[in-house]
Amino acid sequence: MPNIFKKTNRASANFFKKVGRDTSNFFKKTVPDVANKVGDGFEEVGGQIGGGMKKVGSALEKAAPLIADGVGAALLATGYGAPLAGSVIAAGNSASVVGRQIKNSGKTVQSQSSKFGGNVKGEASGFANRANTLVQRKINNASSGIANSVNGMELAVKGQPIQPAGTSTSFA
């Protein structure tokens, strides 16, 4: 009869060992892998959007004054557009300022998306470690509780008094 208790304890210990290993793998490998992919995605998308904004802004910043100066000069040369020439040149300069702002906003988008992606990866890794520690503790407690119960049943079958968990008969 005592053999069944040993087998039960061994089976229970093996079960919880496998559960512990699998949950540990989940929290140590799967969660960080997914978080890294999500974080990398934010960094990639932000990099592409910001890069595009920088290109558009840079082109506008450089081209707008040149185009406006050319159009303004042509208006002045015809003599008919002289009153408009100043406005066209001013508009070109304003467009250049807008281009610079777009370019700078693109840099900000890249920086912030990179920071956010890094935060996603870092926070998920920290969460996974804390969750793994908590789950492993719960698994160990459950495994110990079952082992103690099975040992108590074995003692009861043998006719020995059952010692409540967490108590000691030692007076030392």
Image (tube, helix red, strand yellow):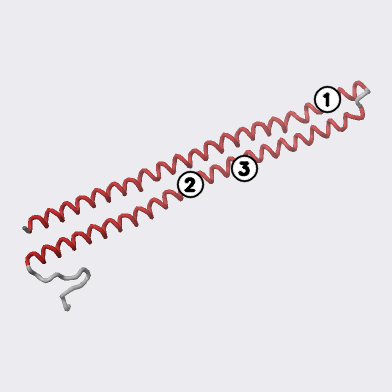
x%, y% of residue 171? 16, 78
Q: Secondary structure at mark 3?
A: helix
The residues tagged by marks 2 and 1 sit, at their Cα atoms, a distance apart of 50 Å
The crowd level at tag 3 (other Cα within 10 Å; few <14, some 14-19, many 20+) is some
Q: Nearer the viewer, residue 1 or 12?
A: 1
Which residue has dot 2 on it?
120
Q: Which residue is mark 3?
A: 108
* Residue depicted at 31% across the width and 49% down the height: 24
18 versus 60 height, above or below: below
147 sits left or right of 41 in the view: left
Callout 3–callout 1 Cβ contact below 8 Å:
no
The amino acid on which the numbered mark 2 sits, given as a three-letter code, is Val
Q: Earlier in the sequence, mark 3 or mark 1?
A: 1
Find residue 89 and report its horizontal and vertical position in percent: 83, 31
Count of all numbered marks drawn on residues in the image:
3
Q: Counting other residues with Cα less than 10 Å from the Cα at mark 2, is it few (<14), some (14-19), or many (20 or more)? A: some
Comparing marks 2 and 1, which lies closer to the viewer? Answer: 2
Marks 3,2: beta carbons within 8 A:
no
Would you identify the image quadrant in which residue 167 lies? bottom left
What mark, if any, has residue 71 been given in the picture? Answer: 1
Q: Residue at x 81, y 33 (%)?
A: 91
Of callouts 2 and 1, which one flags the residue occurring earlier in the amino acid sequence? 1
Tag 1 secondary structure: helix
The CA span between labels 3 and 2 is: 18 Å
Find residue 1 and report its image quarter: bottom left
Whole-Å distance between the Cαs marked 3 and 1?
A: 33 Å
Q: Position of residue 136 (x, y in %)?
A: 30, 55
